Image (tube, rainbow, N blue to C red):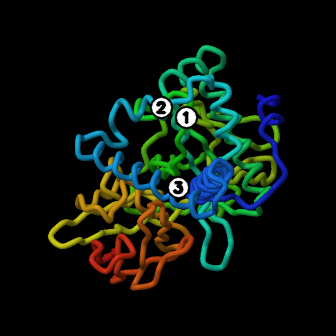
Amino acid sequence: MADLREAVRRPPHAPMPRRSRKRWAVAAGIAGCWALLLAVTGSVFGGTALLLLLAALGAACVLSMRSMGIDAGHPWVKQLATRPWRDGQDVLRLSLRRLSEVFVTSPTGSLLAPNSVELRLSPRDFGSLSELMDIGMISSGAAEVYEEQVAAHDARFVSPGPAEVRVISDPSVPAGRYGLRPVRLPHSGPQPAPQLDPRLGPQLGPQLDPGLDPQPDPRPVWHEPGGSFRCAHEGGTRAEAVVAPAVVAGLPTVAELRSPPIPVLKLITGDAVTQTRTSGARAGRGAVDLVLPEVPTVSREHATFTFADGQWWIANLGRNGLTLNGTPLVGGHAVRDGDSIRWGKKPEALVSRVEIG
């Protein structure tokens, strides 16, 4: 895994959103086609007219395919999206280089990094990796690479605790491709109170809610030299206990880091209501967490909602644009109770009202 970290290291630079890379690639392709047509026709007018004609033909082909039910989810399109020349290791290296795609930019310009990231691979690539190395070891190494990228980009995690990268298999991901998604770590429940020496006094014990009934954690816990604690796991995630060890008179104490609950985020669109408590939830008309009505101005994955710094943040993912309270959205922006989100730039685009609480 150390060799893998060396292979994916790059000089630190500001991460470019995936949508921006696609736009630059499309612009470069159009410029290349225009230059080729200029060389063939020998005329600026002729080359431009031929380029517009090809664009019109391409748009007509796309519209006709959609009318026949051939869209991004069709098996033919998914087959075209595959990269068969990449094996599982190539896909893993490429995805680890671009873990910074999950960062969210705040209005002040700072980068926020989710603590937990889900790396989705196709069943073919996931199977080839599992034959070479344990998935738990791959996830642990990926988490270390993610921490290095967070430090290199001068970003900060949205909540206290260790970083985690979950490598999973997703049949919806084409072979040779990958998917990244920030996820929220599930709350593991109250931890049992540690056995402390009575001579140390009650002030060293953890502050627990008197209404909670602590249940024992089924995972075995062992102590390592130096005052650190570790929890056993099944090898699917990076397992480090979220504890703050302290040594007083040779005895360790543990204080659990408890993050505040995430308020419910509701999107009210006409008679349709959808809600979530998951940081990193996506909104759109596709297979997302917050499903919006099927209208042309709404993309399949139009926006992502992340909870950080005690409030919800929204970032645009769709190509149709996004406006918040009438202002076009650029980068990440905080959303508040009562805000209005227009899913597109056109006046007739779908509008949702935000309720938080």
Q: Residue at x 67, y 37 (%)?
A: 94
* Pick the front one: 124 or 28: 28
- Is 150 left or right of 47, judged from the image as shown? right
Residue for badge 3: 51
Residue for badge 2: 174
Rendered location of residue 198, percent (x, y) = 65, 53
User: What is the number of callouts on the image?
Assistant: 3
Q: Residue at x 66, y 19 (%)?
A: 133
Residue for badge 1: 177
Rendered location of residue 253, percent (x, y) = 68, 51
Q: SS for tag 2?
A: loop
- Between the C-alphas of marks 2 and 3, the distance is 31 Å
Name the quadrant containing residue 17: bottom right
Rendered location of residue 19, percent (x, y) = 55, 57
Mark 1, Cα crowd under 10 Å, few <14 / some 14-19 / many 20+, is: many
Contact, CB < 8 Å: mark 1 with mark 2? yes
Name the quadrant containing residue 48: bottom right
Residue 274 shows up from this direction: yes
Q: If you read the primary sequence from the N terminus, does the residue marked by circle 2 or circle 3 appear first?
A: 3
Amino acid carrying label 2: it is: Pro
Q: SS for tag 3?
A: helix
Name the quadrant containing residue 73: top left
Amino acid carrying label 3: it is: Leu
Figure quadrant of the C terminus: bottom left
**Outermost residue, top direction?**
131
Q: Is residue 131 above or below residue 314?
A: above
Rendered location of residue 128, percent (x, y) = 58, 18
Amino acid carrying label 1: it is: Arg
Mark 3, Cα crowd under 10 Å, few <14 / some 14-19 / many 20+, is: some
